[in-house]
């Protein structure tokens, strides 16, 4: 019975986290950021983004409560900070200056793709909640497998999405970048609004 419960718990965690991470939703932003790269580099950045996200999520799963309590940082403050960073990236996508980040030494696979786009406040909070609910070794193992499986899916989705760039060409990439920027701006504003609403209440 414990094994069935652990399996059900792992499946629930996998589905919930996959929906929150939303790999297809991150794809337009990813494609816009890697459009000037070679196919090999795009593949590397896809798996780097997934790997960084996995590292961030695993860190918060293990030490999340301690980190936030030690630094006296609330989840809402973390959410607002993530929203501001995403808003900055969205403005660069809308103005066509997104690749200036790399000229300044920023690896887009790590920031903003790995975090906060993938490993954002929502995914971090959900993971921390699942950790609190994992009251047995079997459940904890199932949760760990679920988190790894989600990031494998993320890496595969981002990697395979790069084939689209061969079809849409440069004009399509420019259009995609503007659409991605608009969507990302909306996500960022919503994150900020939710954080401000909770902090003000």
Image (cartoon, rainbow, N blue to C red):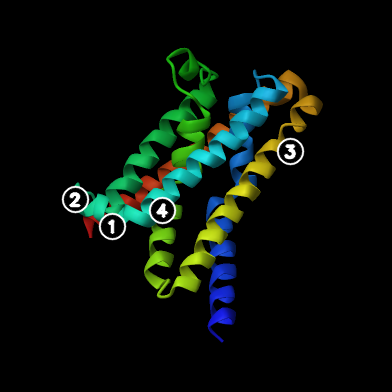
Q: Do the residues labelled 1 and 3 touch (CB within 8 Å)?
A: no
Which residue is located at x 56 percent, y 34 percent?
48
Of the numbered discs 1 and 4, the one sitting upstream in the chain is 1
Query: Where does the image place residue 22, in percent across and percent down from the top left?
Result: 58, 50
Q: Mark 3 points at which residue?
A: 160
Of the numbered discs 4 and 3, the one sitting upstream in the chain is 4
Q: Mark 1: few, some, or many residues within 10 Å (few <14, many ≥20)?
A: some
Which residue is located at x 19 percent, y 46 percent?
71
Q: Quadrant of the N terminus?
A: bottom right
Of the numbered discs 1 and 2, the one sitting upstream in the chain is 1
Residue, far top: 103
Q: Are marks 1 and 4 in contact (CB under 8 Å)?
A: no
* In the image: residue 182, left or right of residue 105: right
Q: How far apart are marks 2 and 3 (CA)?
A: 40 Å
In which quadrant of the rendered view does residue 178 lie?
Answer: top right
Q: Name the residue under label 4.
A: 124
Residue 24 in view of the camera: yes
Q: Name the residue under label 1.
A: 65
Q: How far apart are marks 1 and 2 (CA)?
A: 8 Å
Q: In terms of depth relative to the viewer, which is nearer, 91 or 46?
A: 46
Q: Name the residue under label 2.
A: 70
Q: How far apart are marks 1 and 4 (CA)?
A: 11 Å
Q: Distance between the residues labelled 1 and 3?
A: 35 Å
Query: Where does the image place residue 59, in percent across and percent down from the top left?
Result: 38, 49
């Amino acid at each position: 019975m414990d094994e069935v419960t652990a399996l059900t718990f792992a499946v629930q965690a996998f589905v919930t986290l996959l929906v929150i991470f939303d790999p297809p939703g991150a794809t337009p932003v990813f494609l816009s950021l890697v459009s000037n790269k070679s196919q090999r580099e795009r593949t590397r950045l896809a798996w780097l983004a997934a790997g960084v996200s996995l590292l961030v999520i695993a860190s918060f799963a293990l030490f999340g409560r301690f980190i936030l309590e030690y630094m006296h940082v609330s989840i809402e403050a973390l959410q607002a900070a993530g929203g501001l960073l995403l808003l900055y990236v969205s403005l660069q996508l809308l103005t066509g200056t997104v690749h200036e980040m790399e000229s300044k030494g920023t690896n887009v696979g790590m920031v903003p793709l790995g975090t906060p786009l993938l490993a954002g406040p929502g995914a971090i909070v959900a993971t921390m909640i699942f950790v609190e609910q994992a009251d047995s070794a079997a459940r904890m193992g199932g949760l760990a497998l679920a988190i790894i499986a989600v990031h494998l899916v993320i890496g595969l989705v981002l990697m395979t999405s790069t084939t689209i760039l061969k079809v849409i060409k440069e004009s399509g990439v420019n259009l995609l970048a503007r659409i991605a920027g608009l969507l990302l701006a909306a996500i960022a504003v919503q994150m900020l609004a939710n954080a401000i609403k909770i902090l003000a209440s």
